[in-house]
Image (cartoon, helix red, strand yellow):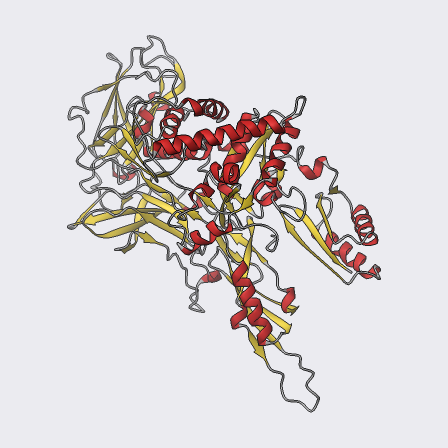
Amino acid sequence: MMKNYIKNSFILVLVLSLLANFSLNPTISRAFEISNKLAANQTTGYVELSPKYNVSPTEEFVFKFNSNLFDGDGTIYKYVKVYDDLECTNEIWIDIETDYDTGTVVVKPPTYLSSPNIIRDSIPEDQRSWGGSSKYYLVISRDMESSNFVELETPLRMMFTVKSEIQVPDLNFRLTSDGEAELYWNKIEGAQEYKIYKGPSYSSTKVLDYYTNTTATSFKDFTVINSFTGTPLNGSTNEGFEGCFYVSAVVNGVESRVSNYIDAEQLIDQIPNSIDDDYFTVSTIYDLPSTATVRMKDYFVVKNYPIIWDYANATIIEPSVTLFTDDGTRSGFIKGKVKGTPLEVECNISEMPSKETLQELAKNQKSSANTGGAISAKDEIADNPPPNLDVDSESQTNIIQEQPSNNAGNTLEGYIAEHMMNMESVINLSMFPEAGNSEILSDTVLMVISQYPLILGEESMSYDYASDSLLITYQTTDKAGVEKKQKEIMDKVKQVVKDVIKPGMTDYEKEKALHDWLTANTVYDFEALEIAEQNNFQEMPKGHEDSFNPYGVLINGVGVCQSYAEAYKLLCTEAELDCVVARGDMTGVPHAWNLVKMGGETYYHVDTTNNDDSPFPYPVFNSPDADIALEYTLGDDFALDSQLMTYQSLDNNFDYYFINNLVITDTHSLKARLTSAIKNKEELVFMKLSSNISDMDFEDTLQSVYYDSSSLESLSYGEFASVKYIMLEY
């Protein structure tokens, strides 16, 4: 982590909602055409049927097959299933009745022993029920219309929600600024309390045990107390974040059904949990490390996080009175907060400086300790429809048949993107059955926000289940002003590509030329970052709105990482390079960068923000996943869930350091390179190391070079995104 050299970046992750019929502004149609083409339009893997809302807890579903049910392997259970998760991995046991004379199949909910996600003893053992959850997925993989047995390549899927007298909370997960795992949910009108339940994460039939209750709309105290010391294990509130968590609302003594669940096991690679060495010794205050290696809840995943040292409160220990003359040397110790985590470290210092020096260090650290963050997205799409939403009273007797899509030529993604770029506030999505599923809709909208940079000023989104409409608010109602900015952005993009891209350039040369133009013509907006931090990243910094969209870097020449990443995507796509905006975090700080496809099949990481003004060239330019793993964590909001595996980056074939022969493969070459640098009085040496050189080999070589040199005063090194940078003083 290059604390002194690398910008701490800042992204604004907002959200939105959607619209009706419109005419797309012709000035942005080219950008939409390219973005829509290059964003991988993958489906959910199912033909989505129109959802059924607020069905009875004992609802039965009836299907009519035209083929003989004895055809095929004769096992209807193989082709009709119910799941309680969007990915359709947690299968729910159901009872099925078949009438072989009429081809009718009736799906019945399970009995108590097999009911999913039930609160212990909440359902009589002799009663059939869809359990305690509020949302399920019924999947049919056999053709109902064919007169012959046909297994569907793309199964049918129908989401249904179960009636609850009280609105069911929408449960979400986030990490606080201190790296604490936190559950949060929407406020339910009239709720006196919320109950939190916990179940195992390894079984789809979960008996839920009461965990705790709260009157707040969030909970983060998962502390596990050591029975011997009475203190939290590992000093972390995250220790007890295990299993699956659910929440319900209690209004006038009536409890709602339980919410969707948060599975801690799916998040353990993101949650900081412990430090191997939280107490150590260094010689001087200047030897304090700037980062700590933190283990996640998944013990084998480690990340680098910055340390904020508490210089102002460092302790100086006076030497004991002796017969010898006091030489003025004092020892002491200092504590540090591992930023972005709930963890602390403590260091013993053999030679502690004066109080005046410590105060100066504290002052300097305070002025340089700003780190980026994200303004929370205002995603108000309710996971469940309101309890009073009308349902088909004859749903139990209705025969469910295959429903072909009538949205020919359209995708949910493209439809939403077009209307949002046109600043529509109400988008009717009734022709897209999958939009009635909040998980699919939220996933799609977040992806659209990331990959269509000409959507400007989006602020919040919600969904009206009654009208099948996405509702969006924007920061401004000045549509003409937004259209003017969109035109300026695209005119600039076209001009830059015309000036920079030359005939005969390879894709790599195009990618690098556009990168170099962007970094040469942009400065980072630290003022916007500072204002946002003062607002705890809850509000858009007034006067700096464009620093969070491509207008900032392309027109004003200033922006934060979101502006860099969105501008670079537009430049690349105009030059017909496949590029997406990536979202996640860097050393615990929300961040945006890019993934660019090279070689026709693999995406690589490019971070124009942190490459700008770096003391060494191109630290993240076509880097594979492994090279940035200690600092970067790729999120899942930038792409549809079904697309995420597309962006794996496993080789370094197009990495800047590989292409330019800056990868050192053995210690002999490493020593020769450093010896040459010392001879030429170089002050900064940079490289990547192959896996043949261990950390111990690297440090031993540095030590050997240092002691062999008569002109070298000091040698120190650091690392960012697998680039080793070695600083030499003479």
Q: Residue at x 66, y 33 (%)?
A: 654
- The answer to whether residue 267 is left or right of residue 631 is left
The answer to whether any part of residue 233 appears in the image is yes
How many numbered discs, if any?
0
- The answer to whether residue 53 is left or right of residue 154 is left
The answer to whether any part of residue 640 appears in the image is no
- The answer to whether residue 122 is left or right of residue 137 is left
For the C terminus, which image quadrant?
bottom right
Residue 174 drawn above or below residue 654 = below
Q: Residue at x 29, y 47 (%)?
A: 247
The spot of residue 455 in percent (x, y) is 41, 33
The spot of residue 70 in percent (x, y) is 33, 13
Q: Camera-side residue: 397 or 516?
A: 516
The spot of residue 555 in percent (x, y) is 50, 37
Q: Residue at x 44, y 24 (%)?
A: 27
The spot of residue 226 in percent (x, y) is 44, 64
Q: Camera-side residue: 563 or 711?
A: 563
Which quadrant of the figure has residue 536?
bottom left
Give the residue at the far bottom of this rendering.
Answer: 323
Q: Camera-side residue: 354 or 96?
A: 354
Residue 218 drawn above or below residue 318 = above
Q: Residue at x 50, y 36 (%)?
A: 566
Which quadrant of the figure has residue 627?
top right
Give the residue at the far top of this rendering.
Answer: 147
Residue 40 drawn above or below residue 272 = above
